[in-house]
Image (cartoon, rainbow, N blue to C red):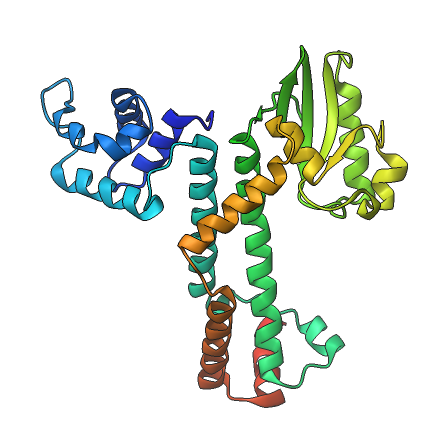
Amino acid sequence: MKYDEKDLIVYMCKKIDGVGDKTATAISVYLENFCNLFDNIDKLNELRKVNGKKLLDSAQIEALSKIINEYFPQKVLNIRYAWISVLIRDFVKNAIKEIQETALDTLLINPFLIKAFGFNDHREVVTFYFYQKVTRSIVTSWGFTVEGLLLCSGAEKSDLEGFDIKIIKRGKEYHFQIKSSPNTMSIEQVRQLNVHIQKIKNMSKQIPMLGMTYGRREQINTQIQSKLIGYPKSTLIGKELWDFIAEEEGYCKKILDWIDKVMKLYPTSFSDILEEKKLSLIKDWENTWGTGKKSIDMVLQNYL
């Protein structure tokens, strides 16, 4: 995926039931540019297969129109902003779906931690493991989303083992391994990155880098500072990374403003959704196991 306007058309079209890569690509080629999704979507009635049948039926065209109106209540011309809008919206929608679909039997309760923390109130147990599950899921999902944000901001997929994205500038390829924060690498992960760095054959053309999507240099952990080959020149963090990728000073602030703008169009009370689900899980616990320490002991028997 190149994260250009044709790929964005494909991405949006695949949200329609019954539309896969082949059909979405055909629509993208036919429409030519993203603006036509706003201005000329009715033209899809004319698009036909080799056998003469319509590529999309009227219900699918109507569904696409609704999807475009949902994601873009106002016409968007900036493709980077359009991609970021879609990626952020889908990330939030998926996070909410993950929360709402969480059930008691999906909480992985560690009986040893229960004893170590001295939990005697079933509400404490539910709260702890519900937040743990949600956090892990969202962090994992965000990793894929943030890579998409970088790719639609000017990066390409790296073709070197151990690296995620690359930027080509002045005849040089900057290959980045991307980490979310400045404190997410263990000593073993740093060593593994060094192994990948040492495998690069042409270090004058292919430059290995570590990119951290937020944080400040003083927050970079000691494992990176003391062990990473080429540190500190081999690292970019926070706005350094975003501005470098987009080749635009102040781009980091711009993308944060874009995200803020997107979510103002689709206000979500995330804390309320979390609280409602937590209370629902507590009620399910009580209906199934009862309350207090006795109910905790009953549940722990199923985990040993």
Left or right side of 135 for 94: left
Closest to the observer, 265 or 271: 265
Residue in the picture at 44% in, 61% down = 268
Residue in the picture at 58% in, 26% down = 155
Quarter of the rendering containing residue 117? bottom right
Left or right side of 196 for 259: left
Is residue 74 visible in the rendered image? The answer is yes
Left or right side of 13 for 208: right
Numbered circles on residues, count = 0
Closest to the observer, 83 or 59: 83
Residue 254 location, x and y as percent? 57, 40
Residue 77 location, x and y as percent? 38, 32
Quarter of the rendering containing residue 135? bottom right
Residue in the picture at 33% in, 29% down = 34
Residue 275 location, x and y as percent? 51, 73
Closest to the observer, 293 or 48: 48
